[in-house]
Image (tube, rainbow, N blue to C red):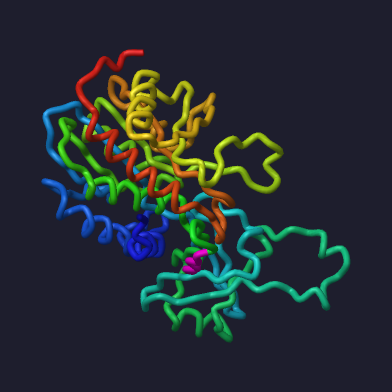
Amino acid sequence: MVNLELLKKVVEAPGVSGYEFLGIRDVVIGELKPVVDEVKIDRLGNVIAHKEGGGPKVMIAAHMDKIGVMVNHIDEDGYLHVVPVGGVDPRSLVAQRIRFFTEKGERFGVVGHIPPHIQKPEDRKKAADWDTIVVDVGAEGKEEAEELGFRVGTVGEFAPAFVRLNENRIATPYLDDRVCLYAMIEAAKALEGHEADIYFVGSVQEEVGLRGARVASYSIEPEIGIAMDVTFAKQVGDKGKIVPKLGGGPVMDVGPNINPKLRAFADEVAKKYEIPLQVEASPRPTGTDANIMQINRDGVATAVLSIPIRYMHSQVETADLRDIDLTVKLAKHFLEELKPMDLIP
């Protein structure tokens, strides 16, 4: 059963890329510390939780950071002008709330929308972009906005909006990648007997270039690297190109970023424990922490374990609780079953 209280806590904790220390880092430390042998934070901010074993050495990573925005100008009317931190589609911000983290605490702003009654016909065909978006924080001028704590460089993220759609499905900002971070934490808690020497990593700055995983994998020097990250589920407008579906179980990639022997082992584990495992073809680097882990030092055998979601990088990312639960089980059993093995393709 998915612990919805913990999942919501993990999803809503602050942590725009580079600012994971604002909230999520402490949550991850608090959840992992009781179940591992050692927890440390490196100079980039990664949380590295070590559960000792004889081998093989495995790094399993889920990134803690969120996409968001940063203030780059406050105009004389008190409106904030913002730029993206990571892959934010400006169209997704229109008529939405943003939670900012100012030097005077949390503040909220709204991205207003000109009512259709007063729009010019030609403007109705134009999409919002970073040149047109402004954030209203209720200030009557620049001085008041600054008194509220806003500065150039203040960061913000989509406001919390966790909702349960029905028995099995939830929607909220930041399932990418907090739902996999939750799954990694729960797998660590459920872990029983194991031979593997396991490093659970809450990585930083994935959304701006896989930066945390680069540092952590260099330090840990794992033989095996598992990236836990979300992937695309079938949804409106995908034109049939997306294969994974909500409720179909966890997803694992095949392709050049994936070690074939490790992938075959995952299939065996899934079959043994009767866990449905969806397959995703990835002919190029996967865009996850596995990219950078794979080419660390003299090479790492990598795999990607994913939870499918709809509407990625929006305020209404949607997932199926059954997929989350099964992903926890697969990660747990995979780590428990892992033994020294020939990893050369």
Q: Residue at x 82, y 59 (%)?
A: 125
Picture residue at 61% right of the left edge, 71% below the top: 111
List x then y, in percent, for residue 34: 15, 55
- Any part of residue 210 in sight: yes
Find out whether residue 163 is within the magenta segment. yes
Nearer to me, 284 or 170: 170
> Which image quadrant: the N terminus?
bottom left
The front one of 48 and 297 is: 48
Residue 172 visible in this rendered orientation of the protein: no
Q: Is residue 67 left or right of residue 35?
A: right
Q: Which residues are magenta?
A: 159-164
The rendered magenta stretch, by its main secondary structure, is classed as loop
The residue closer to the viewer here, 45 or 278, is 278
Q: Residue at x 28, y 24 (%)?
A: 297
Judge whether 52 appears above or below 34 on screen: above
> Is residue 249 inside the magenta stretch?
no
Q: Is residue 194 left or right of residue 12?
A: left
Q: Which x, y percent locates residue 211?
A: 37, 41
Residue under the image location 34 percent in, 49 percent down: 183
Up the image or down, 261 lies above or below 209; here it is: above
Residue 141 at what x, y percent from top left? Answer: 57, 83
**217 and 195: which one is in front?**
195
Question: In the displayed image of the protein, which residue is found farthest to the right?
Answer: 121
